[in-house]
Image: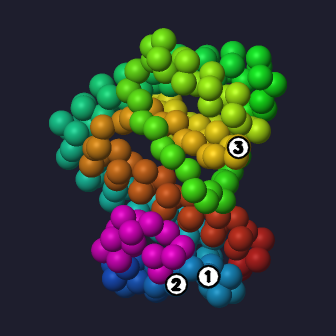
Amino acid sequence: MADLWSDSADVIIRSMEEGIKSKYGIPLSEFLENPLQFADKEGIYDTASKIKEEIGDAIDAVLGRMADEKRKLDEDAALCDTATNQILQSITVHSEQEKVPIVKADMISREEEETIYVSSMGPAIDAMVGKLCRKSNFIADFTAMYNGRKIGEWFFGGDKNYVLKVNLKPNAAFNLYNTREEIMGILDNDMEMIRGVGK
């Protein structure tokens, strides 16, 4: 059900569906969509934990075969981390001057926005951050983490909305890593829902 998860997660879920069902007797996509329908199944929490581990191990095995992509990703993530820290410092200074709050939001229902991708910090970026802060009512920090490295993303909410993103080069290993995190997050939520309800 791609409405509940991304297309890339859907590919992995579909690829593992048959094996999970034959091994554990649970249709994976149905469990992910509605875990409570399985809450009365004997040992469901332990089974869900094993399913989570199996999916994580399968994705990790694929990531293990992507050495070149991971090396490039680690190099790019290090550059992104440096740029993110510098830009965050600029945002912090300008937002304090303009008395614009920075919030850590779980999600924002975005309408129209302009997205600006940057790879490094410099005087022009600092000046742009100052202008964005002056025009904003708030700033939402959506900075992502990869292997302890920050990949900056900030939403500037005002009369006109802007998103400032530190540009990480497209990378198959990063996409797979994010997909893994997405599926693990869904399973964590599902396991929390059945905790204490299941047998």
Q: For residue 14, say whether it is visible.
A: yes
Q: Report the colour scheme.
A: rainbow
Which residue is more in the foreground, 19 or 177? Answer: 177
Q: Where residue 100 sits in the image (x, y, percent)? A: 77, 30
Q: Whole-Å distance between the Cαs marked 1 and 2? A: 6 Å
Extreme residue in the right direction? 99
User: Is the stretch drawn in magenta largely helix, strand or loop?
Assistant: helix
Residue 158, numbered circle: 3
**For the residue marked with disc 2, what is the amino acid?**
Glu
In the rendered structure, does residue 7 fall within the stretch colored magenta?
Answer: yes
Whether residues under marks 1 and 2 lie with C-beta atoms below 8 angstroms apart, the answer is yes
Numbered mark located on residue 34 in the image: 1
Report the residue at 47% width, 17% height from top: 124
User: Which residues make up the magenta segment?
Assistant: 1-16
The quarter of the image holding the C terminus is: bottom right
| Mark 3 or mark 2, earlier in chain | 2
- Among numbered discs 3 and 1, the one appearing first in the sequence: 1
Q: Identify the secondary structure beneath mark 1.
A: loop
Q: Amino acid at mark 3?
A: Gly
Amino acid marked by disc 1: Asn
What is the x, y in percent for residue 104? 71, 40
